[in-house]
Amino acid sequence: MSKRFNRRSRRAVIPLAVVCALLAGAALTGCGRQRDGSVYTVLNSSTDETYHRWDAEAMARCGERLGVTVEQQSVPAAQVMTKALRMASSKSLPDIVQFDASEMPVFAEAGGLTDLRTLGLDTDGVPRGIVNFGSYRGTYYGAARSVNTLALFYNKDLLGQAGLKVPTTWAELRETARELTRGKRYGIALSAGGAEDGVFQFTPFMWSNGGDETRLDGPRVVEALDYWKSLLKDGSLSKSTVGWTQADVNDQFMAGNAAMMINGPWQVETLNTKKSLHWGIARIPVPKPGAKSVAPLGGAVLTVPDTGDERRERMAAKIVGCLTSEREQLTYARNSWMVPADEKAAAVWRGQVPQLDALADQVAAARSRTARLGAGWPAVSLALQSAFQAALTGQSSQAALQRAQQRATNGN
Amino acid sequence: MTTPTVTARGAAPAAGVPAAARPRSRRPLAQWGFVAPAVLFMLLFFGYPLVRNVVMSFQHYTPKTFFTGEAPLNGFDNWSAVFRDALFGKALWHTLVFTAGSLLGQFCAGLALAVFFTRRFPLNGVLRSLILLPWLVPMVVSGIVWRRILDQDTGVLNSFLDAVGLDGHTPWLTSPHMALLSVILVNIWIGIPFNMVILYGGLQEVPRELYEAAALDGATAWRTFRSVTLPTLRPVITVVLVLGFMSTVKILDLILALTDGGPADATQTLGTLTYQNSFVRLDFGAGAVVGNVLILISAVFAVFYLRANRTEGK
């Protein structure tokens, strides 16, 4: 290194330092940006292009009606909770947060949400089940636009060729799945993955059989898990099921690797992109003829976090009210194929999309995951995941679920 | 940043030292001035989070804390809860197996390739740069691609095994007995380029004369490798292994993408357990405990590394 080079490089240091300082300063002032009075933000998980667009359109319509600007900030679904918590600690919560309904109790329990009723949102015309869906300990924190659940999707062509009827009981499902299993094709696909997806899929089997999440080692839950194991043992269900998310299950069904699947209406958008696939939808089969098919109620709720600024909170509630109005619900339901939360809207929707009638029935009898356990759900869900994974990969259902119940009660 | 300099400057004239001695006494001040930014950076970005994490592991830190700012101390509750959890022991074991297996595989393959590439042959450079590819692909992308490749029914690997007449039904990622091994194999694939590049660089430094001398002494290839290559390469090997250890022991992204810790917790490591405790169960105290254990393990190896470096320096 020559001396000249050294001097030159030293001369460059000062401007470089200045530039760095300016950049850092600019970045920091960006953080401390003041809220614009008429701009309202919504934190949601609409990261898919389609959902993001539908939400943007709905927010634009509502913003125009209320004379404000509504912006959305979308993060992956698994990050909504942690993002919202971080925003809470830095006192920068958005005006509206869209939580998955199973996560809402945790945030409400922490004291982060405001009662929507006191903010002027009334619940007349909202079905009781949906009010409960958005409530925690009797307080209505979250308004749902639409709800979803799980149903049995089947390939009409494959069932038709084999001359089989759509199964309605566990025994029929097992038999049909076995007969539809040919070569590389499995009779049925479902998600038993080690995440909330798998638990969501297990609940209709557990609940329809009379099992309950408060007693994971109860005989009814063991029976339900044994039923899953029997599908695996027959070879009608791929062993890969323990690694599949619900989106993977849909891929398998679309690729023709499975003749039936358990899945939800949010897949319809993707299913419809394959024109040659003729699919039908039915209620999830029940243990015995005549038993009630209880499926999990899923979906997101719009909440207003407690920011301490009541004027803004009231306006936020109005925006929630607009987004959950009958008209917006219908638009959203038609786009996303989910069932409108509102009774009247649901009735109109049934007329418009008769092919999803089975879903609307299933939703009416669906049950929320957090109704019994509230903020205790995540711990039970984790314990249940590892239990059915252990059972599907060799352990006995009884032993796996006993261990899960222990984990759930000890909290670890 | 200014604090040490200001106090030091203020102290200098008060001391009333003779003018001739002044430049010399100013030297330590200037030296501290140069060190200060680095020290400050370390304290702010390493010291603070580290201390914070240790404190958090003794606190009842829940979602409520984010609103109230209150996290009551609860002694060793988090620690005993984590250590009583059977999953912790499992995760610790998986982490050790994963780290040892990955390092062994990466290092051996990397060293073999490095030695191979020291020879001159056509396309040497092209091949060497192609082998770097796994290093350039983001970890999550590798994870997702491998998840497809290793799928039991539709994966490329099993289809290939079927095509060559081997029974292609290996449940790579879906059997609790296989999953950890599969994850290790994928991680070896990812780690080979790093090992190869560093070791190849080290091999270039081995003096040619030593090989010539060994050849004159009639040493076999294996003997030359053992008595010439390995000893001269030792400092590089230490660096490769310690750096490899540090980046492997904290593995998270690859496992989340491949198996999400499953099936049946067969691939839970300390990294995924921290993630699960903190961000799924939202029990940040328990997450901090596992995080601290991980830091402790890394720290032990960092000490080894520093000592090894010191002896090399002598």
Image (cartoon, rainbow, N blue to C red):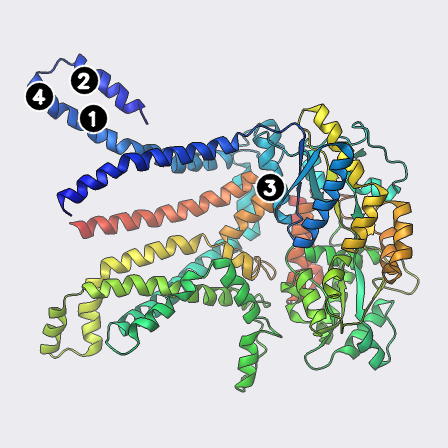
Q: Hey, what amino acid is under mark 2?
A: Ala
Q: SS of the residue at dot 2?
A: helix
Q: Nearer the viewer, residue A173 or A23?
A: A23
CB-based contact (under 8 Å), mark 4 and mark 3: no
Label 2, residues with CA under 10 Å away: few <14, some 14-19, many ≥20: some
The mark found on residue B12 in the picture is: 2
Q: What residue is at 72 percent from the left and 24 percent from the top?
A: A311
CB-based contact (under 8 Å), mark 3 and mark 1: no
Q: Hey, what amino acid is under mark 4?
A: Ala
Earlier-in-chain disc, 4 versus 2 = 2
Query: Which chain does tag 3 point to?
Result: A
- Would you say B71 lies left or right of B51 here? right
Residue B3's image quarter?
top left
Relative to A181, is A128 above or below? above
How far is disc 4 from disc 2 in space, using C-alphas? 11 Å
Q: What residue sits right under mark 3 in the picture?
A: A82
Q: What residue sits right under mark 1 in the picture?
A: B29
